[in-house]
Image (cartoon, helix red, strand yellow):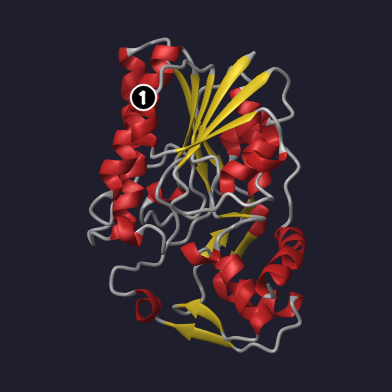
């Protein structure tokens, strides 16, 4: 029986991951989450499936009291979201690095393989649109809350690489997701697609930040978690961009697509996001991944088209908007 730990497993990515791994044979799954950015509703896999032990706790408290060893660890717990990270300013780096170090030491002491979910934010303002894993990272000169998040995630990657030199048997891999989307994503944390859908369904203005020319590579969360589980079950230990370059779209085009798909009468407004969220808010730069490494080691895999993912989310969001 393999013992699996999922930190932050009640959240958006965690829910999709649990649905992916719960059917794997001989797995005993423990989920730790403080529910700071999500709720444990009746549709959560934690409540639906048997064999999942849920511990509501801050991660540091769990790690201090934990006496168990694990075989596989998925580390998802983190501040998240363009708006969600703002309340953690000045604490983001401390939280991300401390949590990761302690989870890594648990993995090392347990001889467990670790999956670390990093972010595409680590690329900084590199002007190259087709961003491979090993390209130099360019740190912007303007220090922002969002930059604290991205640099902390990158520092975490560097820390894991150096820990593997100290502990040669330490096995881990890093996932850098590009603009995840899918069922259960929280519009309140600033994620653009659920926000646009809610606005369109309510007949409210669809608010596009800036001039709408920023490009994003939207990737279905289920495509990402399927890869995470496959890599965990393999001998691969590497850093992977995970994104779907077929889904590249500007934010302005996205607003028009969702307006059309919802048959909405909403107008599209171009606004300064700082008016909504305050001076600490920063919009991201273009994020378009190079996934050649992933394809060379894992092979190609079925990837959901953006319109199909949006079409699947619409009934869920339509229902929620009218509760």
Q: In which quarter of the image is residue 78?
A: top left
Residue 155 visible in rendering: no
Observer-nearest of 148 and 216: 148
Residue 312 visible in rendering: yes
In which quadrant is the C terminus drawn?
bottom right
Observer-nearest of 101 and 286: 101
Q: Is residue 69 placed above or below 264 in the rendered structure?
A: above
Residue at 63% x, 48% y is 221
149 sits to left or right of 299? left
Observer-nearest of 4 and 116: 4
Residue annotated with mark 1: 65
Q: Residues within 10 Å of mark 1 (few under 14, many from 20)?
A: few
Residue 166 in percent (x, y) is at 30, 14
132 sits to left or right of 263? left
6 sits to left or right of 203? left
Residue 278 in percent (x, y) is at 31, 75
Residue at 54% x, 50% y is 178
Residue at 51% x, 78% y is 208
SS of the residue under disc 1: helix
Q: Is residue 30 placed above or below 186 in the rendered structure?
A: above
In which quadrant is the N terminus drawn?
top right
Residue 214 in percent (x, y) is at 49, 68
Q: In which quarter of the image is residue 65?
A: top left
Residue at 29% x, 59% y is 145
Residue 119 in percent (x, y) is at 45, 46
129 sits to left or right of 52? left
Q: Is residue 207 placed above or below 56 in the rendered structure?
A: below
């Amino acid at each position: 029986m393999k013992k699996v730990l999922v930190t932050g497993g009640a959240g958006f990515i965690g829910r999709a991951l649990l649905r992916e791994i719960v059917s794997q044979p001989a797995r005993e799954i423990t989920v730790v989450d403080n529910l700071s950015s999500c709720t444990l509703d009746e549709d959560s896999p934690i409540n639906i499936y048997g064999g999942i032990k849920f511990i509501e706790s801050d991660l540091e408290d769990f790690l201090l009291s934990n006496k168990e060893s694990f075989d596989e660890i998925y580390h998802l717990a983190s501040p998240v979201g363009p708006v969600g990270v703002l309340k953690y300013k000045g604490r983001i780096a401390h939280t991300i690095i401390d949590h990761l170090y302690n989870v890594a030491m648990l993995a090392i002491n347990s001889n467990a393989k670790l999956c670390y979910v990093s972010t595409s934010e680590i690329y900084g303002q590199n002007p190259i649109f087709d961003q491979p894993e090993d390209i130099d990272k360019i740190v912007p000169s303007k220090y922002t809350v969002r930059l604290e998040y991205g640099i902390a995630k990158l520092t975490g990657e560097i820390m894991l690489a150096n820990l593997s030199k100290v502990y040669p048997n330490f096995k881990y891999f890093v996932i850098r997701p590009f603009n995840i989307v899918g069922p259960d994503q929280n519009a309140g944390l600033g994620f653009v697609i659920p926000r646009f859908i809610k606005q369109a369904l309510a007949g409210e203005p669809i608010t596009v930040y800036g001039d709408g020319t920023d490009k994003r590579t939207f990737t279905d969360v289920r495509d990402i978690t399927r890869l995470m589980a496959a890599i965990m079950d393999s001998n691969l230990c590497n850093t992977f961009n995970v994104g779907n370059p077929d889904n590249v779209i500007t934010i302005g085009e996205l607003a028009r697509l969702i307006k059309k798909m919802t048959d909405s009468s909403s107008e599209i407004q171009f606004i300064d996001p700082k008016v909504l969220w305050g001076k600490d808010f920063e919009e991201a730069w273009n994020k378009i991944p190079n996934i050649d490494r992933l394809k060379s080691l894992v092979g190609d895999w079925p990837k959901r088209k953006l319109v199909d993912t949006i079409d699947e989310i619409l009934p869920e969001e339509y229902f929620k908007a009218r509760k």
